[in-house]
Amino acid sequence: MNWIRSSLFALVVLIVTPPYVVFGWLTFFLPPDTRHRIISSWAHVVLWFVWHLLGIRYRVLGEENIPSRPVVVLSKHQSAWETMALQQIFPKLSFVLKKELLKVPFLGWGLAQLEMIAIDRSAGKDALEQVVDQGRDRLQDGYSIVVFPEGTRVPVGQARRYKLGGAWLATQTATPVIPVAHNAGEFWRRNAFLKKPGEITVSVGPVIETEGRTPQEVNQLAETWIEGEMHRLFPHHFEGN
C-alpha cells in the first residue's frame, strides 16, 4: 500500500509543479508579496496530498512561541517535508538555500521566482556576507528566514555540526531566533521514494534573544535546545547510539 501511495504522490507532484512554475512566470508584474503568496501556495497544495494521500499528518507543540514579528528560524533538517510544512506553520517565509537548487528543473525555477536567499556555499566567509546582505532585506520586508544550521538533511538519530550562518545573520540584524525540532525523517526519509504514514511532531522552541550575545552563543543555545528536544520527544531514535 505504501508503494501505491508513494507512486501516486510522485505522480501528483509531477502534474502539479510545472503549471505552478509557468503561472509564476506569468505573475512577474505583480508586487513581490502577492507573487510570493501565489507561488508558495504550491506547498499548501502538495501538503494536502501528503496528508490525504500519504497519510502523513503533523501536530505543532509550542505554537505560542511564534511571534508576529520576523525571526530567524533555526530548524532540524531531515527531509523535504519540513521545507513545505514550515510555510504553513510560520507566516511569510524566506529560506536560505544553496544556489545549485535554482538549477533543478521546475522546482528550482519556481524557487528562483520567490524571495529566497541563494548562496554559493563554496564562497567561505563571503557566503556569510551573502546571507546577511540578502537576509537584512528580507527581514525588513517582513519575512522570517529559515536556516537549516546542519547544512543538509541528516538521518534520524544523528546530528551534524551546527554552522554559524543563521546565528550570524540573527546577531548582525538584531533579530530573535526560534529553534525548531521535529521527526519528519521518521516517515519521510532523506532521498527515499517510499514514505510511511504517521504523525510528525513539530516542536517550536522559545525565543532566543540575540542582543548582547555572540553568534557562537546563539548557535550553541539553539543547538542545545533542538538536540535536547529531539532526545526528549523521540528517545527511540537514539537507542543503541
Image (cartoon, rainbow, N blue to C red):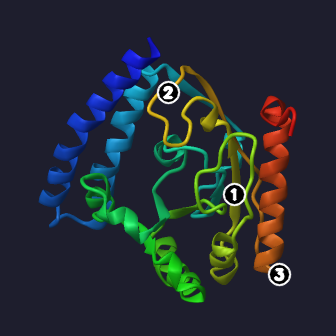
Residue at (33% x, 35% y) in the render: 45
Position of 230 relative to 76 (above/below)? above
The answer to which quarter of the image holds residue 129 is bottom right
Q: Secondary structure at mark 2?
A: loop
**Residue 132 in sight:** yes
In the picture of the structure, the residue carrying the numbered disc 1 is: 178
CA neighbours of label 3 inside 10 A, class few (<14), some (14 to 19), many (20+): few
In the picture of the structure, the residue carrying the numbered disc 3 is: 212
- Residue kind at label 1, given as amino acid type: Ile
- Give percent across and percent down for residue 64: 70, 43
Picture disc at residue 195: 2
Position of 17 relative to 129 (above/below)? above
Alpha-carbon distance for marks 1 and 3? Answer: 17 Å
- Residue kind at label 3, given as amino acid type: Gly
Position of 132 relative to 218 (above/below)? below
The answer to which quarter of the image holds residue 14 is top left
Q: Secondary structure at mark 3?
A: loop
Pick whichever of labels 2 and 3 is earlier in the sequence: 2
Please identify, in this view, whether the residue under mark 1 or under mark 2 is nearer the observer: 2
CA neighbours of label 1 inside 10 A, class few (<14), some (14 to 19), many (20+): many
Q: Which of the two residues, 233 or 176, is positioned nearer the viewer here?
A: 233
Quarter of the image where the N terminus is located: top left
- Give percent across and percent down for residue 153: 59, 51
